Every structure is written in C-alpha cells, then in structure tokens.
Amino acid sequence: MAKNKLKKYKEIAQLPNVIQPLYKDLDMDYKFKGRWANGYFKNGQPLVLELGCGKGEYVLHLAQKYPKKNFIGLDIKGARLWAGGNAALEKKLPNVVFVRADVSRITSLFDNDEVNEIWITFPDPQPKKKQIKKRLTNPAFIKKYQRFLEEDGIIHLKTDNAGFFTYTLEVIEQMGCRLIQCTSDLYAKEVDETLAVKTYYETKFLTLGSTICYLQFQLGAEEVLKS
C-alpha cells in the first residue's frame, strides 16, 4: 500500500492538471491568485470551487455538464488528486484543475470576487467539540470565503451528518447569511441532475441507510461577517 502511494506521489508531479503549491508559495499570494480564469484557463469563464474534493467525482461531473465554466477541486490528499487528475485527462476535460493545498490557506489562492460558486461535499464533520475550528462551515472559514466569493455567489453543502447539518444552519443564521434551499432528506423527492451526483462516500452512506442533507446559501453583507 505504501509503495502504491509513493508511486502515485511520483506520478502526480507529472500530471498537467494537478497543481501542488509549496508551503512557501502560500505564505504570500499564489501566482494565479486573481488570474485563474484568464491566466490559467485562459478563457475568462466563471470559476467554481469544490472544497475537499477527494477523488473529484463531483467536480468532474460538473465540468462535463458545464463546459463553459472553469472548475477547481481542492484537497490535501495527493493520492486522491492523482485519481481525479487522471480521470480528467481520460475524460478530456480542459476546464478542470486540481490543487493540493490545505483549506486554511485558501485566501492565498483566490482574490476578491474571483469565485462564483463553492461546493462542499461530504466533508469530515469534525464531531468533537475541540474540532469545531476545523469544520468547513465554521465562522472563520465563512469569513475566508467572503473574501473571494462574488457578492451573489452560492455555497452548496451536502452531508450525511445531521449534527454538522444543524451546526451549519446555526452558523448561517448567526452570520446573517441567506438560506436558499434546505432539506434533511435530499432524495425524499426527485432532484435535478446536478444534485443527484453521488461521490464514493455518498454512495457508501446511502448503502448504510443514511439520509443526505443539503443546504444552499449566500453569504451575508461583509460588515455582518466581520462582526
């Protein structure tokens, strides 16, 4: 298993659609910050970001469905991005790139109003009280997203964890965000193709009998989020 991972780490460096910034690169603004659409993709199209993308099942589907949008899958696990990068090459998707970085460094990657949409699909719920600061919808992260998500940009959350779902609803209310859609049982009725995409973990959770929760919201005014 270890040898297989080492092989993937070696091969990932050769993938043209996987970027691995050095830690020192993120101590300051990254070279594509504010320039992803025109500098990296070279097309000026809207930018969609998936946080904790894993092997990229969701972002790859979105990239196929919306060829006139650019997609970035962000994750810290190299072996996962190896899978996503190779899948994107096989599917011949020029509008998707994977970035290996910790979400905590995200403001070094994106500039004001640069991202049009954010997807958070089945993140680690960090259930222990001492882990709250690591939850991707905690106030500190929401304030980071505010710095680069466009004014009317949308954040999507899919999770099987009811506690994390409830926690996020509380944060949305506390921070003055605008809740657009909310369901604690996504598949209780028919959903559109975009929401019906199932990642490895979602498929696993459904097999175990879990229900899937979904939220869609917009951030509040900047002055509210700064308070």
Image (tube, rainbow, N blue to C red):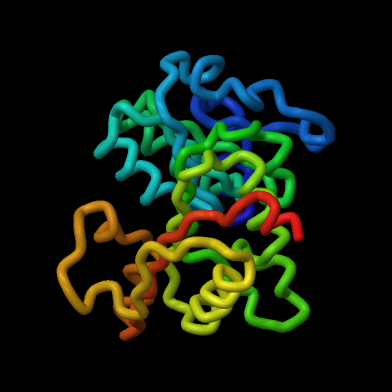
Left or right of residue 182, residue 40 in this image: right
- Residue 86 rendering spot, x and y as whole percentages: 42, 35
Residue at image point 53% right, 64% down: 123
In this view, 29 is above or below 98: above
Q: Residue at x 31, y 85 (%)?
A: 209
In the image, residue 184 above or below residue 58: below
Q: Position of residue 11 (x, y in %)?
A: 56, 32
Residue 28, percent from left and from top: 82, 30
The residue closer to the viewer here, 205 or 139, is 139
**As drawn, 76 above or below 34:** below
Residue at the location (63% across, 48% down)? 146
Res. 3 visible in picture: no
51 relative to 28, above or below = below
Q: Which quadrant: the C terminus?
A: bottom right
Q: Nearer the viewer, residue 127 or 171?
A: 171
Where in the figure is residue 22, as x and y percent of width and height? Answer: 76, 33
Residue in the picture at 49% in, 51% down:
53
117 relative position to 208: left or right: right
Residue found at the far left of this picture: 190
